[in-house]
Image (cartoon, grey):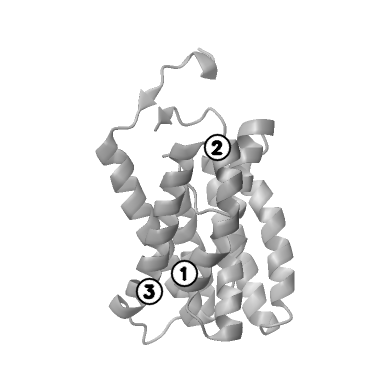
């Protein structure tokens, strides 16, 4: 049976809610790993981390603010339902990233472990959100749009843009921190690229 002939399996509201909560909690925990280890990631989260390091303003504040201009593209290209879900997810990540830093303390956090595990947590969280027609705004919206419109893999699109953001980070962070960040970005985007392929997942929201 071809992919397009497979029956769709609609998500129930409680499944969407659970994915929203768990996905944003995973992303917030990954961000906490990165902020403690002073690492970078890509997309709007990377921009927010970079501005956090440069200004001292919290990641959550910057993450929420940076995403505001992208809602127009979300409404125009992805619809109101997707946009509202994304708005809620961004708000939850902004909130949970602040709370997680109060809930979790690290006596020791090796940079390599923080990069790989933080990237994996964020990748898994984003995968949950993607599969329930939700994103974390910004580059995620652009990547999802390009995948739906042109069949380009969302993970590969993000990987290219993330590379540019990490290059900019070289002006602000030591080389070893950027190197670890590259490993984290590869981990995050490979999780999405290998698991979020068109037609692989038939659940719909």
Q: Relative to residue 132, is residue 72 drawn left or right?
A: right
Q: Is residue 18 above or below residue 67?
A: above
The tag earlier along the polypeptide, 3 or 1, is 1
Position of residue 62 measured from the top left corner of the image (x, y, whole percent): 53, 71
Q: Residue at x 72, y 54 (%)?
A: 160
**Callout 3 touching callout 1 (CB < 8 Å):** no
How far apart marks 3 and 1 lie (CA) works out to: 10 Å
Near mark 3 (Cα within 10 A), the count class, few <14, some 14-19 or many ≥20, is: some
Front position among marks 2 and 3: 2
Task: Name the N-terminal-most of marks 2 and 3.
Answer: 2
Would you name the residue on which mark 3 appears?
98
Q: Label 2 belongs to which residue?
A: 78
**Relative to 45, residue 4 above or below:** above
Query: At 36% across and 87% down in the image, what residue appears?
Result: 107
Question: Which of the two labelled residues, at mark 2 and mark 1, occupies the earlier sequence position?
Answer: 1
Displayed quadrant of residue 179:
bottom right
Q: Nearer the viewer, residue 195 or 65?
A: 65
> Where is residue 162 drawn, in percent x and y?
67, 60
Which element is circle 1 on?
A: helix
Residue at position x 72%, y 78% in the image: 170
Q: Position of residue 84 (x, y in %)?
A: 43, 45
Q: Is 199 displayed left or right of 204 in the figure? A: right
| 152 relative to 170, above or below | above
Helix, strand or loop for disc 3: helix
Q: Which residue is mark 1?
A: 31
The quadrant holding residue 25 is bottom left
């Amino acid at each position: 049976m071809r992919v397009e002939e497979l029956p769709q399996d609609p998500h129930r509201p409680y499944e969407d809610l659970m994915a929203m909560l768990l996905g944003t909690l995973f992303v917030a925990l990954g961000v906490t790993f990165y902020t403690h280890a002073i690492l970078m990631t890509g997309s709007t989260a990377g921009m927010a981390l970079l501005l956090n390091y440069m200004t001292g303003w919290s990641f959550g504040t910057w993450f929420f603010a940076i995403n505001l201009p992208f809602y127009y593209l979300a409404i125009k290209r992805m619809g109101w339902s997707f946009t509202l879900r994304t708005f809620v997810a961004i708000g939850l990540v902004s909130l949970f990233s602040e709370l997680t830093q109060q809930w979790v303390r690290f006596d020791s956090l090796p940079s390599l472990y923080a990069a790989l595990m933080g990237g994996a947590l964020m990748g898994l969280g984003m995968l949950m959100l993607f599969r329930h027609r939700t994103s974390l705004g910004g580059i995620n919206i652009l990547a999802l749009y390009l995948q739906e419109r042109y069949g380009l893999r969302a993970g590969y699109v993000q990987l290219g843009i993330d590379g540019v953001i990490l290059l900019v980070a070289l002006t602000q962070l030591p080389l070893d921190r950027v190197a670890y960040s590259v490993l984290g970005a590869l981990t995050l985007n490979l999780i999405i690229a290998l698991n979020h392929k068109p037609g692989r997942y038939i659940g719909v929201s």
